[in-house]
Amino acid sequence: MSDIDRRMAEAQQAETDGRYREAAHLYNRLGKDIQARHGRYDPQALDAFEGVARAIRKGSSTA
């Protein structure tokens, strides 16, 4: 399992557990790291930023 896959799984687990703020932070950090290594429009970075938006949406609907 690559570092990106491991970190994505960690963020997904936080989201699944209802820890939306933590999930958004993990997805955001991962997205930025992927962009720094692989370019601004890398599909994995875009997936991570979609995770940020999803976690924020879920978190705001429970407040």
Image (cartoon, rainbow, N blue to C red):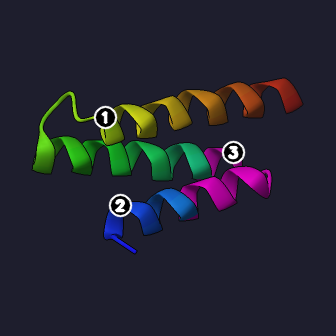
Q: Could you say where residue 47 lies in the image, as x and y percent from the top left?
A: 43, 36
| Magenta stretch in the rendered image | 10-22
Crowd class of label 3 (few under 14; some 14 to 19; many from 20; radius 10 Å): many
Residue type of the residue flagged with mark 1: Pro
What residue sits right under mark 2 in the picture? 4
Q: Which is more foreground, mark 3 or mark 1?
A: 1
Residue displayed at 69% across by 50% down? 15
Horizontal placement of 6 versus 13: left or right? Answer: left
Q: Which is more foreground, mark 2 or mark 3?
A: 2
The quadrant in which residue 17 appears is bottom right
Residue displayed at 83% across by 24% down? 61
Residue type of the residue flagged with mark 3: Tyr
Q: Could you say where residue 46 lies in the image, as x and y percent from the top left?
A: 36, 31
Q: Which of marks 3 and 1 is nearer the N terminus?
A: 3
Residue type of the residue flagged with mark 2: Ile
Q: Residue 20 carries which label?
A: 3
Q: Is residue 3 magenta?
A: no
Q: Which mark is residue 43?
A: 1
